[in-house]
Image: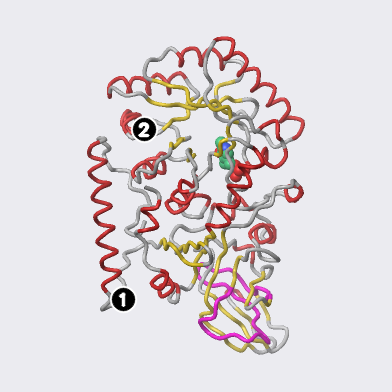
Amino acid sequence: MPERYFTAQPSAEEIEQRIAGFGGWFEVDLDALSANLKAIRERTGAEVMPVVKNNAYGHGLRPICSALVSDGVKWLMVAKLSEALAITSWRLPCHVLNMDMLYTDDQFRQVVASDVTQVVYTRDLVQRLNKAAVELGRQVGVFVKVDTGLHRVGVAHSDAISLMKEIAAMPAIEIRGTFTTQMQDDEQDQLIFDRFQRVLDQMANEGIDPGFRSLASSHGIFHYPQSWLDMVRPAMALYGIYPWTPDRDCGLALRQVLTFKARIEELKPVKKGETVTYFGKYTATRDMEVGTLHVGFYDGLPREMANKGTVLIGGQSCPSIGSVSLNHYLFDATGVEAEIGNVVEVIAREGLNDLVTTAETADWMVYSLLNHLSPFVPRVYYRGEVPVALHEIGVYRGSRGSKKPYLHQQMKTLVHAGDFLFRLRTRWCGSCREPYQSSES
Ligand SMILES: Cc1ncc(COP(=O)(O)O)c(C=O)c1O
């Protein structure tokens, strides 16, 4: 059950004790995630298939999947087979759609044996998938990707119906969805919609069930009601982000889900004229106090934030100075009441250092910022402002003398043993353990 992930977590007090020792960590507001999901459902009336690729855009794959499935999500979409297999190994009551290309016979068998739904768009892909399914005596679901103009992957819209007919005749394959991707260009998107609709009409004429008809990612959800069809595929909107300025006026109220916090590791006076950090990148224009955080581009902060960013301490903005190093980020702490260990908001929920503004300050896309957040930084998950889960890579042994963390670890061992037996049963070789499955996942 999805809740299993949350019920197997340390208590709120234990999580808070752990946080007290973190130099930097991401906070994920699961209430905001739920509210965004609800808002998207109400706006579109369509099935929502969250896109949780790349560690759920940095938010943490397992907790985000568990939370979404608890909120009734029935489909999750990923870009890598390792993510799809990880999700199926958690046995959440939902379907997983894999966009990754398959190359080896072993991968085709893994998809079938793990009941992953596969994106297909070439004859070779469906034929090999059908062969693997027949050999294993199972059915496999597919979403057919149609290329309506992006010229990336997908069967060309003009050739789609002949591939659909072949797939429909394959005994072990079931079409569960037909989808395409918008260009996010107003003129082109009408053309894309028309081409996609033509393919759907052809399928209807041939009596082929397209399964879920899907076109819209966040952009379509924001601006293009025609594109909502049966299923929408948000990532950004779900994580509470309007990637482009016009998105904010679309009438959909979202809350940013992720924030980035850090503790002050050092505070020191620097005299006017002295330089700060590598290559003397910054020269003090007056006597000042320099604060250092133990975070940097290791964690995913753009180096381009140097001398341009802002951090918040107790609601007060402080400019970043010098450079963004691998593990250090400096700010002007002059006149600020602060001491070592105080918490600083590196990326806040709103204002000058929210996610979008931080990305813009660095001249990055907010997509790049989120998708470069390090999976090694601890993530803390909140409901009602109470920490309900902690995702931390590495073995958490708990404090000496406390039995609770130890018991918690034992429970996890049992859960992993269960997963292992399940994999054996489904004949998955288990060679694809990915970074999300640390001992803390
Ligand atoms: C096929 C597909 N659909 C939907 C999305 C989600 O896009 P967005 O983050 O803009 O909502 C992606 C992300 O790249 C995608 O590849």
Question: In the orientation shown, which residue stands out farthest toward the top?
Answer: 206
Question: Can you say which quadrant of the picture contains the C terminus?
Answer: bottom left
Label ID, residue 190: none
Callout 2 touching callout 1 (CB < 8 Å): no
Q: Which mark is residue 115?
A: 2
| Residue 293 lies within the magenta run | no
User: In the shown orientation, is residue 254 left or right of residue 390?
Assistant: right
Point out the quarter of the image occupied by ligand 1.
top right
Q: Position of residue 12 (x, y in %)?
A: 42, 69
- Element assignment for label 1: loop
How would you rate the neighbour count of disc 1 (Cα within 10 Å): few for under 14, some for 14-19, many for 20 or more?
Answer: few
The scheme the figure's colours follow is secondary structure
Q: Is mark 1 within 8 Å of ligand 1?
A: no
Q: Amino acid at mark 1?
A: Ser
Closer to us: 71 or 159: 71
Give the percent coordinates (x, y) of residue 277: 58, 77
* Residue 114 percent across, percent down from the top left: 33, 35
Please provide the residue range marked out in magenta: 317-344
Residue 150 percent across, percent down from the top left: 63, 30
Q: Residue at x 63, y 35 (%)?
A: 216
Q: Quadrant of residue 100?
A: top left
| The stretch drawn in magenta includes residue 326 | yes
Q: Residue at x 22, y 43 (%)?
A: 421
Image vertical order of residue 263 relative to residue 187, above or below:
below
Q: Tell me what residue is drawn at x 42 percent, y 63 percent.
A: 390
Q: Identify the residue under disc 1.
A: 399
* Amino acid type, mark 2: Asp
The mark that comes first in sequence, 2 or 1, is 2
Foreground residue among 391 and 368: 391
Residue 205 lies in quadrant: top right
- State the residue in front, 281 or 291: 291
